[in-house]
Amino acid sequence: MAFQKAVKGTALIGGGAIATVFGLSQFSQYRNKHGALGQVQAAEVVPVKNHLPTREQQILALQTSSEFDVLVIGGGATGCGCALDAATRGLKTALLERDDFSSGTSSRSTKLIHGGVRYLQKAIMKLDLEQYRMVKEALEERAHLLQSAPHLSAPLPIMLPIYKWWQLPYYWVGIKLYDLVAGSQCLKSSYVLTKSRALELFPMLRKDKLVGAIVYYDGQHNDARMNLAIALTAARYGAATANYVEVRRLLKSPEPASGKLRVCGVRCRDVLTGKEFDVKAKCVINATGPFTDSVRKMDDEAVPNICQPSAGVHIVMPGYYSPDNMGLLDPATSDGRVIFFLPWEKMTIAGTTDSPTDVTSHPIPTEEDINFILSEVRNYLGADVEVRRGDVLAAWSGIRPLVTDPSSKDTQSISRSHVVTVSDSGLVTIAGGKWTTYRAMARDTIDAAIQEHNLKAGSSKTMGLKLEGAQDWSPTLYIRLVQDYGLESEVAQHLASTYGDKAFEVAKIAQVTGKRWPIVGKRLVSEFPYIEAEVVYGVKEYARSAVDMISRRTRLAFLNVQAAEEALPRIVDIMGKELNWSEQKKKEELETAKKFLYYEMGYKVKTEQLTDSSEISLVPSDIERYKKRFHMFDKDKKGFITILDVQRVLESISVQIAENTLHEILNEVDLNKNGQVELNEFLQLMSAIQKGHVSGSRLAVLMKSAEENLRRRAAIPVDRSGGGL
């Protein structure tokens, strides 16, 4: 057996050595290239606007400019990257996004900045040079992204647990090659852990048959805020960037010399006002991700599809499921996919799935995908950690715009390499790629645009360029926020890591709490560090809907759908004042945001865990125990409890809860929505809690706490009280 292990290990290491030679040759080439780039970029400085233009000013610029050099369609990471690249080269640039910046795929990622360990594995196993080049480029771009926005990103150690001895040399070689390909941009060197050390760093890990673990480093970021930072930086460099502007059709005009029709702009509509207008441009760039082909067909209806969409579902669970600063990689799930299990924003994110899908603006996570992820997570966590369906606090689906042959159906074998194409009419399309390589994709796209349309501009200037908030940020910036403004330490850390050096602008408009501490900074919800001032500042960052605020300016919707719903009324009130919304508009915004949470962020599948048809599977002794608890509230034996019953019990134990909060608590369990909780509904709730389908039920906790309180307050017998009259 030992000999077999040794043979396997030697063979694998030998195979790895061949790939190592290949990697070394590429690495030396990369170092020369990177060194030259660094020298070029350091010499050029582009002035930045001190004040961010308002959305109204941006719309006016779009309407009044006679012609732009470059017009980008799409406000995701790639589109905003194209706008930034073009603007910093001195090109007159415009960007149009029909929804909000990062409203699509760019906000629904795994939150990793990575080269792609699995792609390197495929490159080596299949001797695939294209995959190798993609990984190499992604690792170079990973380093850039971490440096350009250090407040929004950071290195993250990721553990790969090993359960078979022969896997240790196999994965060790692969991970070491990953370090080697990164070269001088390697974040930190990977290392091997013993079983005991692995369990010390990741105590939730399954212990039985664990051999050891390998830890490597990748980057992690706040994806929606990173996308927004790119958009805001482009605006500061002079790009006319506008969200909620929809492209209706492409404009074309005949070329003077040949008479051939060429794309010369777009007809668009301001979604917020309904006003339509034309925007002229020498070059139009299609950077619409999953919607790539729909824009290409505006140019030529007969053009074949180049994009095959793939859906990836992620779930968010409480932070106690993972250590604060250690992720987990499952390299081979039951169906061959890869699952990441990562700490993020003090929660735990798990994903992703990978399955063909239709293109839609509103992808919905399915119960099947959520249960698949939970099942894979259970395989890696210890038996003493109960992985409960009820602990899924949010879930979402993102559509990856993979580039493929239209006849291909296997999305798992598709590379995420990007493709830049130019149509006969001059429409430049950038498709495929991945979040990490957005800057390189933008560079290649603008290079192609300059060449095709004879634009006067130099080479890309974005390597080493600091994004919004990064210029004067430091890891200790939050301390100044605490000392200068009287913010809670947790809130100050959050503001510094979200807005960078712009955090002071948020702190300046934070409201006084009226408390001894904190002095300023009213939270939107108690368990998250988001404050009301961020809503006001979010409007300055072009937020125009409640959905923008809960999902992309703050990340509440991605962290906890119930907390996001709880914060909505206050968010709508603040936005209403800033944007002069009518009462009807505020009501519409509230309903739209609730619908977004219900369908797109997993609230629907969460609420379906407890329905009026849910099975009661409790043993007789548990049924009797829960009936007694219920009847402590239902004194009149009505068979149901109301707000009045709950208030009566709470008063008897000197506990006060606001009436509107009690309405919300009962409504969570009132399955038939008749304004009361019946005994059967209460038993269904307790059964769902026991099975792990539901967790964090406020009514269940409240009733249990009240029952224990009443027992403690029971009259003390005279003989035990020391006598009496």
Image (cartoon, helix red, strand yellow):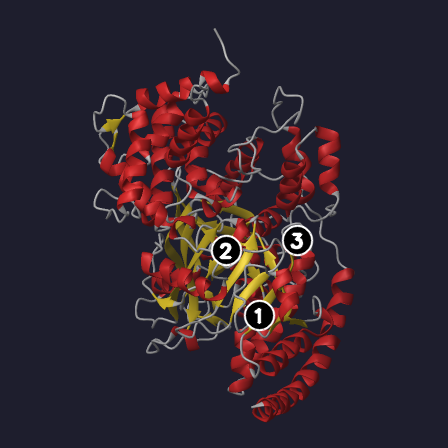
Three-letter amino acid code at the position of disc 2: Ile
Kindly check if marks 3 and 1 are in contact, taking CB atoms under 8 A apart as contact.
Answer: no
- Check the image and report above or below for 349 versus 521: below
Q: What is the CA distance from the residue labelled 2 to the residue labelled 3?
A: 22 Å
Residue toward you, 337 or 503: 337
Q: What is the CA distance from the residue labelled 3 to the residue labelled 1?
A: 27 Å
- Check the image and report above or below for 71 versus 423: above
Three-letter amino acid code at the position of disc 3: Ala
* Residue 48 position within the rendered picture, expressed as x and y whole percent measured from the top left: 69, 46
Tag 1's secondary structure? strand
Mark 1 lies on residue: 160
Residue toward you, 615 or 188: 615
Three-letter amino acid code at the position of disc 1: Leu
Mark 2 lies on residue: 349
| Residue 408 visible somewhere in the drawing | yes
Mark 3 lies on residue: 149
* Foreground label between 2 and 3: 2
